[in-house]
């Protein structure tokens, strides 16, 4: 990450305080690779973060402008910010699964419905790991966590025929992709396309938590073993099981299919000012 | 000058537009809905943006986002929505975001009665979020004209203090129709003692300086200054920190930037206090209009009474309550909120009349003044109300 860190990140925040074996750094790196390959400079992008491992670890790491929201609210903040900023400034949000698919889901769906020009990177570690490993909304059904000692009693957003990305697609998102933190350029390419989309983009990254989900849910702190379990989720081998299974890559690309929220609002406002009679 | 005959809601909107509000975000709720409706009609014509939010939590967050992008922003609601502001209100206080929040108070708790005035958020407006370690600025109009003036002043105070400012109105002020005057040019603006302070942007790198100074420009994102703002305790440059010394520094800034400049906030209207009357009525908002009438009537009946109307509620103006008089507090809640603050400030018990959703009559107040002057206690609020 050295040259990327030097180019884009603040020395004071790097290296991060993430646990050893955490996959978040890999997600962070893929975002920066996409930023670099897209020719985006530090003044071109405002970086927002949520609450939890992915939010706190990435907050104010960016050499450009940074903001953080309270839990689940950064999508609503981004709506106002998007309207205030010039169209060419990009807004990127790094958030966790609890933030996006739990407490902030309503705001996230409304952000997708409006097709607000933001790129949301959900770094998903299958639960609330920064508070010590409680189950979340992507934790596979039946898994033991610190708040489900007998196994979870409810299904997550990623199983039983339900996929949170399908829900976001129905809500109006114009670019959606899913990857694991182990993937390389393919994942970087998805982030590049997400950043390039003028509307609402979301890339769902699944990454391993060794300290909590690994230790409690998978009963292992062996990095290799945990990584193999995560890889299985994306492989044909995992398809036969009852748990979650995904194919990696772009799941929905409708970039440019409908107007971006702030651009449309600004165009409409100009029209109203030019022809006030269209207003009652 | 242009004169309108319209509601307090309409007056608030005219003031916001004149102040240069760039984003209004709200959620429909009686009796503040007309603010949203009027904004949706007026703002685009002035080049601003109306964004209807999915809930009040989102509404205030959208306003914060707009403000972080360099625009002036406002939201408006009533009690059930005001309580949902708790989360973003804290962000705006700690992140030092200038914006304006209107609460058209109605009777509660919870949904209560939509079409009746209340004053149940007196304390909530002091502590609209969790965590402590902050002061709030709260203004309380009692007429449509004042709703206009105070909204313009609220926008300016928000800029100068770099903090959210609340207009704590009530349903009678926001729904009531009265004439109000709006300036049409700079000269008329100045004639009304008003001005428009433009939005500025902090140049960095110390976005959160340890000082009680006024007029520190707010953090604006998108300028590529390496700005940082968050819900976490900030270092001077905006980094998140777990250092308690930094938290103390931040808390002192949030408190003393306001307390050191009280003269800009403190507002009150005193009537018939020159001869140190024996009874001093205390109120704010709509009840203050009946109180003023009652004091005038009491004076006609040679009763020794005067009144204090609070036009700013927080920080509380303790120094107004150093008189030898018996304080008699009138408010639109039955348990008594303002009365507790008056008792604290005056360091002795006060008399209290609290009603739910309707104003007391002038005659009722004059009778109460007579009782107090005779040394009798007022009937407790739980007793059936005296016949008017």
Image: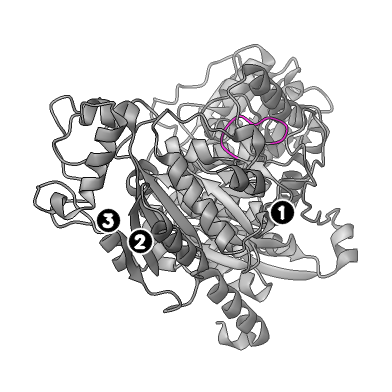
The answer to whether residue B281 is left or right of residue B172 is: right
Query: Element type at marker 3?
Result: helix
Q: Is residue A276 left or right of residue A229?
A: right
Q: Does residue B178 appear to the left or right of A28 in the view shown?
A: right
The span shown in magenta is B230-237
The circle on residue A147 is none
Q: Are marks 3 and 2 in contact (CB under 8 Å)?
A: no
Nearest to viewer (mark 1 / mark 2): 2
As drawn, B83 above or below B40: above
To which chain does the residue with label 2 belong? A
Q: Quadrant of the C terminus of chain A?
A: bottom right
Where is residue A59 shown, x and y percent of the image?
A: 55, 40
- Give me the chain letter of mark 3: A
As for residue B235 lying within the magenta part, the answer is: yes
Quarter of the figure with residue B192: bottom right
Dot 2, how many residues are within 10 Å of its Cα: few (below 14), some (14-19), or many (20+)? many
The secondary element bearing badge 2 is classed as strand
- Mark 3 or mark 2: which is in front? 2
Q: Whole-percent x and y of residue A4?
A: 60, 48
Q: In which quadrant of the rendered view does residue B297 lie? A: top right
- Residue position marked by numbered label 3 in the rendering: A164
Q: Residue furthest top?
A: B348
Asked whether residue A99 is drawn in magenta, I would say: no
Task: Report, in whole angstroms, how far the alpha carbon at label 1 lies from the one at label 2.
Answer: 29 Å
Determine the CA span between mark 3 and mark 2.
11 Å
Q: Is residue A119 positioned above or below B101 on the image?
A: below
Cα gap from disc 3 to disc 1, whole angstroms: 34 Å
Would you place residue B19 above or below residue A7 in this image?
below
Residue for point 68% across, 46% down: B98
- The quarter of the displayed image where residue B166 is located: top right
User: Which residue is under mark 2?
Assistant: A177
Find residue B224 and name its label.
1
């Amino acid at each position: 990450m050295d040259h990327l860190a030097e180019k884009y990140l603040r020395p004071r925040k790097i290296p991060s305080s993430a646990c050893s074996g955490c996959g978040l750094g890999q997600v962070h790196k893929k975002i920066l690779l996409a930023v670099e390959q897209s020719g985006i400079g530090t003044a071109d992008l405002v970086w927002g973060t949520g609450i939890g491992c992915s939010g706190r670890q990435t907050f104010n790491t960016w050499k450009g402008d940074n903001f953080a929201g309270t839990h689940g609210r950064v999508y609503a903040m981004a709506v106002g910010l998007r309207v205030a900023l010039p169209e060419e400034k990009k807004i990127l949000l790094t958030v966790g699964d609890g933030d996006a698919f739990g407490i902030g889901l309503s705001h996230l769906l409304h952000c997708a419905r409006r097709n607000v020009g933001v790129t949301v990177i959900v770094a998903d570690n299958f639960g609330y790991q920064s508070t010590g490993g409680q189950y979340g909304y992507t934790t596979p059904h039946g898994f033991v966590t610190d708040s489900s000692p007998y196994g979870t009693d409810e299904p997550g957003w990623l199983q039983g025929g339900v996929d949170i990305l399908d829900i976001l697609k129905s809500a109006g998102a114009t670019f959606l992709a899913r990857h694991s933190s182990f993937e390389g350029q393919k994942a970087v390419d998805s982030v590049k396309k997400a950043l390039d989309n003028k509307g609402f983009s979301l890339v769902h990254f699944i990454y391993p938590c060794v300290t909590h989900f690994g230790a409690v849910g998978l009963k292992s702190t062996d990095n290799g073993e945990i990584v193999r379990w995560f890889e299985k989720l994306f492989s044909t081998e995992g398809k036969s099981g009852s748990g979650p299974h995904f194919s990696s890559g772009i799941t929905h690309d409708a970039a440019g299919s409908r107007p971006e929220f702030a651009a449309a609002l600004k165009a409409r406002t100009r029209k109203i000012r030019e022809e006030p009679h269209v207003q009652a | 000058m242009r004169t309108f005959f319209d509601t307090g809601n309409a007056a608030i909107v005219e003031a916001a537009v004149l102040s240069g509000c760039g984003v209004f975000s709200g959620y429909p709720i009686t009796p503040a809905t007309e603010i949203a409706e009027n904004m949706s009609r007026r703002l685009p014509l002035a080049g601003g943006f109306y964004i209807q939010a999915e809930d009040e939590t989102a509404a205030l967050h959208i306003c914060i986002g707009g403000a972080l992008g360099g625009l002036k922003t406002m939201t408006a609601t009533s009690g059930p929505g005001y309580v949902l502001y708790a989360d973003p209100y804290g962000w705006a206080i700690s992140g030092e975001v200038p914006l304006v929040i209107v609460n058209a108070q109605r009777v509660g708790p919870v949904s209560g009665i939509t079409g009746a005035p209340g004053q149940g958020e007196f304390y909530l407006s002091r502590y609209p979020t969790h965590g402590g370690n902050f002061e709030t600025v709260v203004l309380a109009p009692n007429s449509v004209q004042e709703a206009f003036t105070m909204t313009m002043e609220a926008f300016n105070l928000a800029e100068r203090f770099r903090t959210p400012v609340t207009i704590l109105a009530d349903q009678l002020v926001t729904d009531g129709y009265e004439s109000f005057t709006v300036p049409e040019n700079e000269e008329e603006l100045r004639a009304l003692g008003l001005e428009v302070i433009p939005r500025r942007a902090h140049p960095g790198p110390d976005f959160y300086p340890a000082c009680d100074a006024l007029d520190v420009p707010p953090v604006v994102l998108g300028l590529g200054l390496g700005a940082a703002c968050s819900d976490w305790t900030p270092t001077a440059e905006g980094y998140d920190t777990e250092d308690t010394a930094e938290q103390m520094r931040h808390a002192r800034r949030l408190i003393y930037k306001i307390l050191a400049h009280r003269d800009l906030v403190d507002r009150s209207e005193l009537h018939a206090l020159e001869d140190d009357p024996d009874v001093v009525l205390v109120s704010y908002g709509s009840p203050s209009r009946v109180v003023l009438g009652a004091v005038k009537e009491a004076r006609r009946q040679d009763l020794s009474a005067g009144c204090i109307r609070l036009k700013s509620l927080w920080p509380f103006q303790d120094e107004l309550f150093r008189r030898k008089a018996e304080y008699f507090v009138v408010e639109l809640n039955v348990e008594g909120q303002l009365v507790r603050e008056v008792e604290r400030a005056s360091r002795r018990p006060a008399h209290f009349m609290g009603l739910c959703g309707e104003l007391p009559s002038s005659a009722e107040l004059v009778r109460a003044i007579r009782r107090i002057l005779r040394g009798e206690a007022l009937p407790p609020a739980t007793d059936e109300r005296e016949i008017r």
